[in-house]
Image (tube, rainbow, N blue to C red):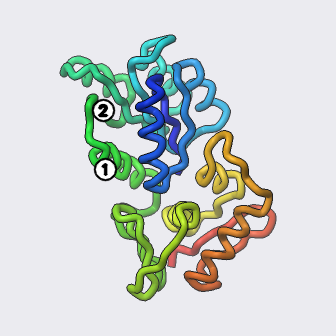
């Protein structure tokens, strides 16, 4: 799951990036509204975390600009503006959710999980396909109810495929969910992750769609 983080405070952005990546998200970060609009237009993320206090323009204007071109992209607002009227304006302008600063990271992650479930074929924190069970809340995987250790990117890849079970995920989409901007990606990195997952979870779970990408069947 690729998140675009729009936050001009460098220390806050770094802390959020670290916490989100630990939870299996891929994160791209920009520090102003113009860059946010450009990023959404050139490499559409799966979700946006948008701070309203940006240096070049009001975050509400950024929100409205994104919404005028993309009505479905989930957007969570972060702001120090705690008044009721500010929350109403944000939601009426197209935000899916609103979180006031300061906030607990656990609450932000919970709200992201709710938004994430709206995007996928699953509506619960636990996804079971065959003998494989993935728990989104705990970032855990089990085969035949026995825990299996996965690397962060192996978990991210499996999560993306299981959340979109029955749908083919292209190489470009999968790589965008595993790697942020500036991260070096080896040409065979995706194949290596798939190979490791097949060794740990069974060779039949992940199907190769030649020339396109990968798929996990829904049943």
- Residue 187 in percent (x, y) is at 80, 58
Mark toward the start of the polypeptide (1 vs 2): 2
Cβ atoms under marks 1 and 2 closer than 8 Å = no
In this rendering, does residue 117 appear at all? Answer: yes
Element under label 1? helix
Residue at the (50%, 64%) spot, across then down: 159
Pinpoint residue 77: horizontal percent, then vertical percent. 36, 30
Residue drawn at x 45%, y 54% as measured from the top left = 22
Above-or-below relation of 157 to 37? below
**Residue 177 rendering spot, x and y as whole percentages:** 59, 52
**From the viewer's perspective, is residue 18 above or below residue 201?**
above
In space, the residues marked 1 and 2 are separated at their CA atoms by: 12 Å
Relative side of 3 to 77, left or right: right
| For residue 151, side relative to residue 59 (left or right) | right
Residue 164 x/y as whole percent: 53, 62
**Residue under the point 42% across and 19% down:** 59
- Residue 110: which disc? 1
Q: Residues within 10 Å of mark 1 (few under 14, many from 20)?
A: few
Residue under label 2:
98
Q: Residue at x 46, y 45 (%)?
A: 18
Query: Is residue 42 positioned above or below 108 on the image?
Result: above
Image quadrant where residue 94 sits: top left
Label number found at residue 155: none
């Amino acid at each position: 799951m690729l998140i675009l983080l729009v936050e001009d405070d460098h220390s806050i952005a770094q802390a959020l990036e670290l916490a989100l990546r630990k939870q299996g998200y891929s994160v791209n970060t920009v520090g102003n509204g113009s860059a946010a609009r450009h990023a959404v237009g050139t490499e559409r993320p799966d979700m946006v975390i948008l701070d309203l206090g940006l240096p070049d323009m009001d975050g509400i204007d950024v929100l409205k600009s994104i919404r005028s071109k993309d009505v479905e992209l989930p957007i969570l607002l972060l702001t120090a503006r705690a008044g009721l009227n500010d929350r109403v304006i944000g939601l009426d302008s197209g935000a899916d959710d609103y979180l006031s600063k300061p906030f607990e990271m656990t609450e932000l992650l919970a709200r992201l999980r709710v938004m994430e479930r709206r995007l996928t074929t699953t509506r619960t924190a636990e996804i079971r396909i065959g003998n494989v069970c993935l728990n989104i809340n705990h970032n855990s995987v089990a085969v035949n109810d026995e825990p299996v250790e996965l690397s962060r990117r192996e978990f991210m890849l499996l999560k993306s495929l299981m959340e979109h079970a029955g749908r083919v995920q292209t190489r470009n989409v999968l790589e965008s969910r595993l790697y942020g901007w500036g991260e070096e990606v080896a040409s065979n990195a995706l194949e290596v992750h798939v190979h490791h997952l097949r060794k740990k979870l069974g060779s039949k779970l992940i199907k190769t769609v030649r020339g396109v990408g990968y798929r996990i069947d829904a049943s």
